[in-house]
Image (cartoon, rainbow, N blue to C red):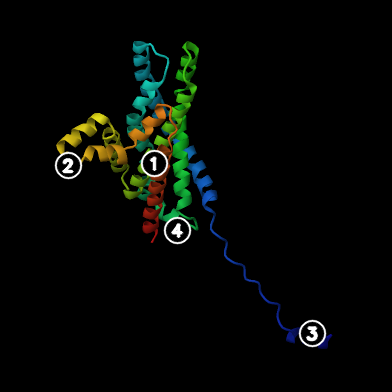
């Protein structure tokens, strides 16, 4: 027994297995977690109910007034007013996304975790888009009413709703980017609303003509309308056209704005 114990004492120790540190959660896993948290926060704080009610009531009342005056069974008037409504309401949805995190000091905690910033950015964006879908769903009674009163162009309505969703993608991405730049929610809201309203206004052909008249050589109004403003691409959808250029504009600008938000957070992280 003594010999066996001695042999065991002199035998080489078993190699110790060192486990690799756990990998940080994937982008989509983190996005799902943040999406659920943010969407629940919208309803827990009654933001969804307050903003949704105000948006739906204002949009539908204005449309119903014009609808009974015109007596035409289509939703053109509703979609015509949507860009300005989105320019005001959606910055109110996004203003707290990162500004509140910075003000309460939770942004540093979030960025110190083994989570890639792209995950929370996508999660917050999708939560805002889901809430915007709730806003748009408030117009479905109008669709039912028009179907009962007349024979609407369903293809045009479907294209218009597609344009409405893409417009929301642009506005929410822009609002989230501005929210990441400041710790003040009010500043984020005002900056987002002013920027989006200006982009919508310069997309109007009449405003573009006025700006062109001020500087005919530069054609500033035409450039702003055809290159910068989201209004012309959106209007192509409301006219029933699923234009590839419109898809490229909204998805491209939305992706660039979300990537810019990630870059801002990465810089804050370092």
**Local SS, label 3:** helix
Under circle 4, the secondary element is helix
CA gap, disc 4 and disc 2: 52 Å
Q: Could you tell me if the residues under marks 4 and 2 are in contact, i.e. CB atoms within 8 Å? A: no
Near mark 3 (Cα within 10 A), the count class, few <14, some 14-19 or many ≥20, is: few
Q: Outermost residue, right direction? A: 1
Q: In screen coordinates, is 107 left or right of 186? A: right
Q: Earlier in the sequence, mark 4 or mark 2?
A: 4
Going from N to C along the chain, the mark reached first, 1 or 2, is 2
Residue at (52, 41) in percent of width and height: 36
x and y, in percent, of residue 70 in the image: 35, 12
Asked whether the residues under the numbered discs 1 and 3 touch, taking CB atoms below 8 Å apart as contact, a structural biologist would say: no
Residue under pointer 2: 217
Residue highlighted by disc 3: 5
In whole angstroms, how far apart are the C-alphas of marks 3 and 2?
A: 97 Å
Place residue 111 in its image quadrant: bottom left
Q: Which residue is mark 1?
A: 249
Disc 3 to disc 4, C-alpha distance:
50 Å
Quadrant for the C terminus, please. bottom left
Q: Nearer the viewer, mark 3 or mark 2?
A: 2
Q: Position of residue 85 (x, y in %)?
A: 34, 29
């Amino acid at each position: 027994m003594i010999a066996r114990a001695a042999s065991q004492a002199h035998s080489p120790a078993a190699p110790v297995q060192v486990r690799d540190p756990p990998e940080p959660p994937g982008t989509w896993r983190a996005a799902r977690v943040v999406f659920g948290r943010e969407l629940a926060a919208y309803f827990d704080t009654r933001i969804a109910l307050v903003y949704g009610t105000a948006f739906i009531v204002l949009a539908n009342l204005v449309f119903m007034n014009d609808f009974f005056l015109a007596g035409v069974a289509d939703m053109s008037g509703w979609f015509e007013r949507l860009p300005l409504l989105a320019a005001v309401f959606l910055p109110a949805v996004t203003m707290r996304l990162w500004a509140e995190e910075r003000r309460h000091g939770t942004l540093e905690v979030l960025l110190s975790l083994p989570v890639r910033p792209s995950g929370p950015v996508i999660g917050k964006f999708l939560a805002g888009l889901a809430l915007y879908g709730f806003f748009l769903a408030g117009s479905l009674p109008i669709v039912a009413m028009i179907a009962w009163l007349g024979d609407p162009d369903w293809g045009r309505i479907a294209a218009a709703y597609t344009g409405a969703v893409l417009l929301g993608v642009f506005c929410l991405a822009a609002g989230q980017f501005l929210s990441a730049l400041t710790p003040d929610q009010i500043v984020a809201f005002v900056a987002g609303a002013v920027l989006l309203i200006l982009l919508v206004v310069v997309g109007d052909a009449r405003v573009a003509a006025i700006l062109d008249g001020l500087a005919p050589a530069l054609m500033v109004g035409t450039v702003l309308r055809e290159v910068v403003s989201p209004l012309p691409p959106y209007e192509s959808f409301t006219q029933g056209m699923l234009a590839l250029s419109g898809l490229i504009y909204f998805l491209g600008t939305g992706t660039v704005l979300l990537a810019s938000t990630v870059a801002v957070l990465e810089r804050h992280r370092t």
